[in-house]
Image: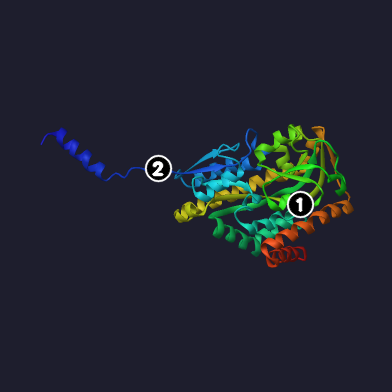
Amino acid sequence: MGRTVIAVMLLVFVNLFVVPAAEPLVLKVTYSPGNMPAEDSPEIMFGEVFKKEVEARSNGRIAVEIYPSGQLGVASEMLQGVMAGYIEMTLIDNTMLNQHFRLSQLLAAPGIFSTISEWDEVMAGPWGEMYREEVRKNTGVMILNMYCKGFRHFTTSNKELRVVGDARGVTFRVMESPVAIRMVEALGARAVPMPGSEMYMAMRTGVVDGQENPIASFIQDKSFEVQKYMVLNGHVAGVTLNTINAALFDSLSPDLRQAIQEAADIAAEEGKRVMRDLEVRGVQYIRDQGLTVYQPTPEELKDWHDAIRGPTQEYIRSVLGEAPMEELLKAIEVVRNK
C-alpha cells in the first residue's frame, strides 16, 4: 500500500474521532442607556463588566452581545423578549413588571422605604427571596440580582416645586405603571405614561412639563437639558432588575449557571458603585447645568410622602388584597427595629 494512501486513511481515521468545537452560547444583553461612558451609567457598567467576566469564567463557552440604546425595543418590549425567550437578558426598571405580575406593584409604592440601605436589607432577606421566586414562577424571568438605583425625584421645566401644593396642575411623564399614574394624580397633577425613550422629546416640545426619576437616570437621560427645577422629595425607590430567561438558565450545565450568576453579581456591584457615585456628585452636577435644586425640610418631605402614600397603597390593596402590603411593611419594620 502506497504511502499516500496510508496517509489519507490515517487522516480519515483521525477525523472520525475529532469532535468539532461547540459554538458558544450567545447571550444578548439589552438596556436603554447608550452613548456615554460606563462611569456615567450603572447599566452600561454592568454590561461591560458582565461580558468580560462571564466570557472569562466560561472559558469562551458563553459569548455576550450587548445591545444598548434600546436597539431591540423600548423597555417593555425588551422585557417581553426575555419572557418569550428571543432575548436572553435585559436590565429593566422593576415597574416594567407591573403589567405582567401584579405583586411587583408593591415595590412601586411611594413613601415606604426610608434609605437605600434599608431597601437593600429587605431585599436580601426572606421577603426579597420570596419576591424573586414569585417573579420567576409567574413570568418566566429569573432575577439574577436587583438593586436600588436611588430614590426618584420630581423635575419640571416651567414651575419650581417646593411643597406638595406646587405640583397641582403640572403634567408629568410617568412610567407605564398604574401605581405611578395614581401617585401623580394624588398630587392634583396630570400623569402621561410613556416609554422612557419618548420622554426627552415630550419634555422638549412641551407635551409634558416634567418627569420623575432617580438622579442617575436623570443625568444619563440628559433630562437636565430640557428641565429647570428639581425637588429632592425622594418619593419612591427606583429598582433595577438584572434578568435572564429562566428556562434558558435552567437548561444550562451547573458550571455555566455558576459562571453567569457570579459574573452578574460582580457586574451588579460595579453598577451599584456607579449609582452611588452619581448620587453623591449628581446634585452638584445638575446644579452646574443651570437647574434650581430644592431640598425640602423634614416637615415638607413628610407632606410629600403622606400625600401620595395613602392613595397609592389604597389602590395596591384593592388589587392585591391586604396581606401582601402588610407583609412588605412588616419586613421593612423588622429591618428598622434591628
Residue depicted at 19% across the width and 36% down the height? 8
In the picture of the structure, the residue carrying the numbered disc 2 is 23
- Looking at the rendered structure, the number of numbered marks drawn on it comes to 2
In the picture of the structure, the residue carrying the numbered disc 1 is 183
Question: Quadrant of the rendered structure where residue 316 is?
Answer: bottom right
Crowdedness near tag 2: few (<14), some (14–19) or many (≥20) residues, C-alpha within 10 Å = few
Q: Position of residue 322 (x, y in %)?
A: 71, 66
Q: Mark 2 is on which residue type?
A: Glu
Q: Position of residue 291 (x, y in %)?
A: 82, 35
For the residues labelled 1 and 2, the Cα–Cα distance comes to 49 Å
Under tag 1, what secondary structure?
A: helix
Dividing the image into 4 quarters, which one contains the N terminus? top left
Nearer to me, 102 or 251: 102
- Left or right of 284 in this view: 70: left
Task: Give the farthest residue toward the left.
Answer: 1
Under tag 2, what secondary structure?
A: loop
Q: Is residue 146 above or below residue 70?
A: below
